[in-house]
């Protein structure tokens, strides 16, 4: 077979050579590691065993080698499970780095063996090891797990593993014993083992109603009781005419006169001998078949359009899903390989594949650990084809985690698992949009929103800089973070990565503001996506273990930054500040007071042609006064020497990128460079405000319902102005409602409802007692739709801006309702302000 690089003529192909030639950064991983020999494995286990006594462990404890990956400078990274009497101790493992001679360089461990002792005294205290003989067999454990899983048929044969299950509890540190719950920081608590149980870990991979239902279930091997269960499915939810990226170059293989979507230059082995895109051809999501590799008589593929339901999966329209997938998979591979030196998903260059056209009207995409592959649906009610670049990068990010840290898909570690995939998706998007070449990830190119392109309503699945914009994700760590869905507990770490890359904002009205940053400057400085991703990738692949939580992730990230850029470096300080911004660890001053730092970054600007574009920068530190130099697309702007730069924007200015360099008055001068800010010039349609008195400053008119909640009351503060609507806060049984009637024009092209909401509560725990629903009703009071429901488990410091699309109600007269119910004790307050409905 002859490898064919479609679209790339020889001269064009030669221009890409520098991306793969020359000396790559020494932080790259090595080439794929050769499998360890039996002797090498035995030697490593022996070296680890020799370290046991120093850790207070006896011969009952051991190591079981699991995965191996390449490291830097000839090193090897090996993951080893901890065992007790031959049984694996769940969530207790080590990441061991060895040199080329097999010597142990470092060990990063999640050690949950402390107190695991087979002695009679330990067992009598309830802290030692349980009996290692099960009361029933694996088949019975599987039966129990299946009975607790809402599946109808097995997709993969279930399996059960007998192991030691540490029952972990969270307790406060001594210094935080008297802290209020709302004041706790992630470093104020620690996870400790309360006791151990003999248990079966049962993995069931089933299907129900056309959907995969993957569960991991922990069952007591003595009583048969279900100890814990969690969702194990990791979801997101030639010339190629792609759906989301225009015409893109894709690597295919020419076999005779037939072109195949098989890229043998990226990955080896695997199911198809190279990276491939296959046609699932609507096989059921209950048990999807990857089908065969896409073929074509020419090397031009797709029509760039959304798949037409019921149509051919192999004609030009049907090929577009395959083009989306191949371009996304190529760029994911290249991002990891060219930037990190990481080959394919497992670091050992094992080829993977993506199957498209799964089921019919299927609103999902998922990574399947059993095949180390991805399945993509065509979309249905909510999404178009799910093969956008960031979604593919997201799912393949699960493949990297599956092969390395294997973060347990539950609790805080599950949130970090999801966050890693969001981070990978954004890194791949930035790399691809910059041309997909080179050895670094640019700061611009990605939108910092997951899945925006695939959503039919234009709303992304997640916002990296302000996760709570989706109504469910969290912006910061709290003691209840591990109790929510992993897609929502990923929020704080996503925000951390955004701040680490791009910095924060010091204005409390900004969505990039964090009240937890209280050192100087208040607006932390980002280090760029490239450095941020290198630090994160190193931590996830060489330091995180399966049970890593937020507090531990911070420590491992600081270690990674120290090793890559030096202890106390700006990069290491930025990691500390980024985690402090999400209530994990305390904030630190960013730099020496004698160093100039950017305190106010210039923001992206959107204006109509003929309007005034204004960019502003602020600085602290060094010796005042400062001098300023503004740059446009890298070239200095003559005469632009003030903290603010303004000019009349024209259509030709669209897309221009601006930055400022600030210098102090010392000799030699110290300087600091701002982040880039992009100018968008276009026609901005006028907006109309439909809500009257949305800030409640003019009394109660025209609001209706329980209007007594409107006022200026002690105990709460307004988002702006002096008045607000305080629903709840009674501490007794109550029902309160507030609504306003509006007519959304039938000609509207957009209709965006927003409001500021602050929630505080005296309730504790994860049980819902008090709630407020935001609904749309008709003039008769019939509910047309529920926009969001908030409850006592969702408190937050300060106000959060909530935004919803009301365009589906255009041409109708509707009521915007805030309906609150409170139970008989312990107050929850839902404070609403700045209600707005903007239409165009």
Image: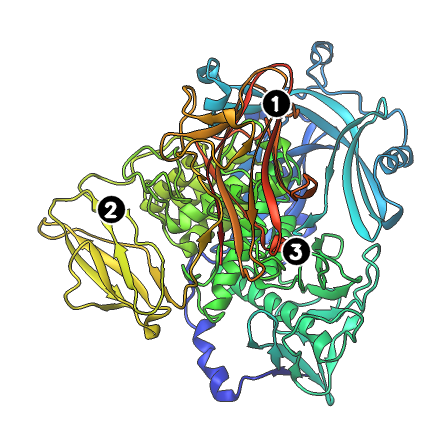
Say which element carries label 2: strand
Name the image quarter holding residue 453.
bottom right
Who is closer to the viewer here, 589 or 219?
A: 589
- Label 2 belongs to which residue? 597
Give me the residue at 83% from left, 25% from top: 225
Residue 509 falls left or right of residue 65: left
Can see residue 691? yes
Q: Quadrant of the N terminus?
A: bottom right
Give me the residue at 53% from left, 61% from top: 428
Image coordinates of residue 718 in percent, x first then y, are 40, 30
Who is closer to the viewer here, 100 or 219?
A: 219
Lower sequence index among marks 3 and 2: 3
Say which element carries label 1: loop
Camera-nearest label, 3 or 1: 1
CA separation in Å, label 1 and label 2 = 45 Å
CA separation in Å, label 3 and label 1 = 32 Å
- Label 1 belongs to which residue? 114
Say which element carries label 3: loop
- Label 3 belongs to which residue? 35
Lower sequence index among marks 3 and 1: 3
The reply to whether dot 3 and dot 2 touch (C-beta < 8 Å) is no
Image coordinates of residue 167 in percent, x first then y, are 68, 24
How packed mark 3 is, by other alpha carbons closer than 10 Å (few <14, some 14-19, many 20 or more), is few
In the image, residue 118 sits, relative to residue 780, either above or below, namely above
Lower sequence index among marks 1 and 2: 1
Camera-nearest label, 3 or 2: 2
Give me the residue at 47% from left, 28% from top: 710
């Amino acid at each position: 077979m002859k490898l064919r690089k479609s679209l790339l003529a020889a001269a064009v192909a030669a221009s890409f050579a520098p991306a793969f030639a020359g000396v790559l950064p020494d932080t790259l991983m090595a080439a794929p590691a050769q499998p360890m020999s039996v002797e090498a494995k035995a030697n490593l286990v022996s070296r680890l065993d020799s370290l046991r006594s120093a850790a207070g462990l006896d011969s009952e404890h051991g190591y079981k080698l699991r995965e191996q990956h390449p490291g830097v400078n000839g090193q090897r990274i090996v993951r080893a499970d901890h065992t007790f009497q031959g049984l694996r101790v769940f969530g207790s493992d080590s990441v061991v780095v060895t040199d080329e001679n097999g010597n142990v360089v470092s060990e990063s461990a999640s050690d949950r063996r402390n107190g695991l002792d087979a002695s009679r005294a330990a067992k009598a205290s309830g802290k030692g090891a349980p009996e290692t003989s099960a009361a029933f067999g694996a088949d019975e454990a599987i039966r129990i797990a299946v009975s607790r899983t809402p599946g109808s048929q097995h997709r993969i044969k279930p399996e059960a593993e007998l192991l030691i299950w540490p029952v972990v509890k969270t307790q406060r540190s001594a210094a935080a014993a008297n802290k209020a719950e709302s004041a706790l920081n992630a470093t104020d608590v620690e996870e400790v083992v309360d006791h151990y149980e003999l248990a079966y870990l049962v993995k069931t991979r089933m299907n129900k109603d056309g959907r995969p239902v993957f569960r991991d279930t922990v069952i007591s091997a003595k009583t048969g009781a279900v100890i814990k269960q969690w969702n194990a499915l990791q979801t997101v939810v030639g010339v190629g005419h792609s759906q989301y990226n225009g015409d893109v170059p894709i690597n295919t293989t020419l076999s005779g006169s037939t072109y195949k979507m098989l890229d043998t230059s990226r990955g080896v082995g695997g199911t198809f001998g190279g990276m491939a895109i296959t046609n699932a051809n609507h096989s059921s999501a209950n048990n999807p078949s990857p089908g065969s590799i896409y073929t074509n008589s020419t090397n031009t593929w797709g029509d760039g359009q959304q798949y037409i339901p019921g149509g051919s999966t192999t004609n030009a329209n049907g090929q577009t899903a395959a083009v989306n997938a191949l371009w996304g998979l190529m760029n994911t591979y290249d991002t990891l390989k060219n930037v990190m030196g990481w080959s394919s998903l497992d670091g050992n260059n094992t080829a993977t594949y993506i199957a498209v056209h799964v089921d019919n009207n299927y609103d999902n995409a998922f990574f399947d650990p059993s095949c180390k592959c991805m399945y993509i649906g065509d979309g249905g009610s909510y999404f178009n084809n799910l093969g956008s670049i960031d979604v593919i990068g997201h799912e393949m990010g699960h493949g990297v985690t599956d092969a390395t840290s294997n973060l347990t898909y539950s609790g805080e570690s599950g949130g970090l698992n999801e966050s890693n995939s969001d981070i990978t998706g954004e890194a791949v998007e930035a790399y691809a949009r910059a041309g997909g070449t080179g050895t670094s990830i640019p700061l611009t190119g990605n939108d910092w929103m997951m899945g925006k392109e695939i959503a039919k309503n234009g709303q992304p699945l997640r916002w990296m800089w302000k996760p709570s914009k989706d109504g469910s994700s969290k912006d910061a760590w709290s003691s209840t973070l591990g109790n929510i869905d992993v897609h929502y507990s990923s929020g704080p770490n996503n925000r951390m990565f955004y701040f680490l890359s791009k910095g924060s904002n010091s204005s409390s009205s900004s969505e990039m503001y964090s009240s937890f940053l209280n050192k100087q400057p208040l607006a932390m400085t980002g280090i760029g996506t490239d450095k941020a991703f290198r630090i994160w990738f190193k931590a996830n692949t060489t330091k995180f273990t399966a049970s890593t939580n937020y507090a531990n992730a911070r420590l491992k990230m600081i270690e990674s930054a120290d090793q890559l850029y030096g202890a106390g470096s700006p990069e290491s300080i930025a990691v500390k500040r980024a985690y402090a911004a999400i209530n994990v660890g305390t904030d630190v001053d960013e730099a020496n007071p004698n160093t100039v730092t950017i305190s106010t970054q210039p923001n992206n600007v959107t204006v109509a042609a003929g309007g005034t574009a204004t960019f502003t920068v602020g600085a602290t530190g060094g010796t005042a006064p400062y001098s300023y130099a503004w740059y446009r697309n890298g070239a200095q702007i003559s005469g632009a020497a003030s903290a603010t730069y303004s000019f009349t924007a024209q259509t030709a200015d669209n897309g221009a990128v601006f930055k400022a360099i600030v210098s102090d008055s010392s000799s030699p001068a110290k300087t600091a460079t701002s982040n880039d800010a992009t100018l968008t010039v276009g026609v901005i349609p006028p907006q109309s405000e439909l809500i009257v008195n949305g800030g409640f400053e003019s009394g109660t008119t025209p609001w209706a319902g329980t209007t007594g909640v409107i006022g200026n009351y002690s105990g709460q503060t307004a988002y702006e102005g002096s008045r607000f609507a305080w629903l709840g806060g009674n501490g007794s049984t109550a029902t309160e409602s507030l609504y306003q009637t509006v007519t959304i024009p039938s000609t509207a092209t957009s209709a965006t409802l927003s409001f500021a909401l602050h929630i505080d509560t005296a309730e504790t725990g994860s049980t819902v007692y008090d709630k407020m629903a935001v609904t749309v009703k008709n003039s008769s009071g019939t509910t047309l739709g529920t926009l969001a429901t908030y409850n006592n488990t969702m408190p937050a410091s300060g106000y959060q801006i909530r935004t919803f699309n009301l365009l589906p109600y255009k041409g109708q007269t509707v009521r915007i309702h805030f309906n609150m119910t409170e139970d008989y004790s312990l107050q929850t307050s839902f404070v609403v302000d700045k209600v707005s409905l903007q239409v165009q």
